Image: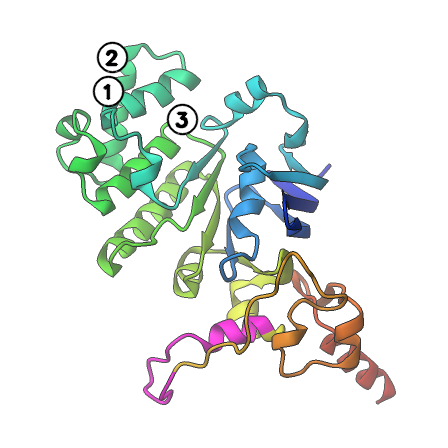
Amino acid sequence: MTNNLLDVVDLQISFFTPAGEVKAVNGVSYSLGRGEVLGIVGESGSGKSVSVGAMMQLLAYPGKVVGGNIYFEGRDVSTLDKKEIRKLRGKEMAMIFQDPMTSLNPVYTIGNQLVETIRQHTDMDKKQAFDHGTEMLRKVGINNPGQRMKQYPHELSGGMRQRVMIAIALCCEPKLLIADEPTTALDVTIQAQILDLMKKLRSETDAAVILITHDLGIVSDICDRVLVMYAGRIVEAGSIDDIYYNPSHPYTKGLLACLPKMDGEQKQLQPIEGTPIDLLNLPEGCSFAPRCNNCMKICLKKEPPEFLLSEGHTSACWCHAKAKDKEAEE
């Protein structure tokens, strides 16, 4: 086993519905080093949240891991029992969920929820845990933290609730922080504050971060590497420079083309034509082929493997095989 903090090997997740098997994640593999920030991007339904939910055994019924392994510090997470996974959650691996209003318990105060998490994973008594929770609220930039500890979630703004979620996630100093759309539904000012906070906390705690988002601007600001997912597969992976300045997969190019340009030359947004693939009836070949302008015959018949374009930069597209054949002929 490697010295990485996290190794995901050929992960396969399906949802068994009355209509059939939905292959939400179909053979995903990647690694994460200590202190590294990894961005996972892709449209809704591409398998981003489902893949990280499996790391903490948080798959909702009828989801099930049907293949592959997830190794956290060399331990296979899928083999842990309920008691062991409870020790792992919050202490070594924590998650910031997408909607803090539905993630926080509305009938308990902020203090109660922080204290419960801290006491679950440490030897602190109630007063020590309360003081530590108050200090965590101060660290994440919440004013009057002592007063906020006594308030309920509905009494706080959306940005403050998100900061509370970050405080809860970080109160036990986890080695891995998973942030699932942490800035969704927040205005741009609060988004910037949350990102600055995450960068500051990363530098202070050296925690590794997996950031799931639709916002490519956020990814470029905070991440070291990027995974682009489509129809449950990683179609392209690379560094920030690889993905933003040398994109190679048609889907990645399409996502970047959807971004508005600040130079004023772009008159209108360029959406990716077509509709997302039906995961109940995956095609025989490339999942992106029905929406791809460069589709070839082989794309409809055979699923493309990952092609290594440069160190750390891979892309699953048959166009690279064609380019290599052309280079060989020359």
- CB-based contact (under 8 Å), mark 2 and mark 3: no
Determine which residue is flagged by label 3: 172
- CB-based contact (under 8 Å), mark 1 and mark 2: yes
**Residue 143, horizontal then vertical, whole percent:** 15, 37
Q: Main secondary structure of the magenta part?
A: loop
Drawn side of residue 205 relative to residue 104, left or right: right
Determine which residue is flagged by label 2: 127
Task: Classify 10 Å Cα crowding around label 3: few (below 14), some (14-19), many (20 and above).
Answer: many
- Secondary structure category for the residue under label 3: loop
Tell me if residue 169 can be seen.
Answer: yes
Q: Amino acid at mark 1?
A: Asp
**Residue 14, horizontal then vertical, whole percent:** 65, 45
Q: Is residue 105 magenta?
A: no
Give how far apart the Cα atoms at labels 1 and 2 are. Answer: 6 Å
Q: Which one is in front, 319 or 201?
A: 319
- Secondary structure category for the residue under label 1: helix
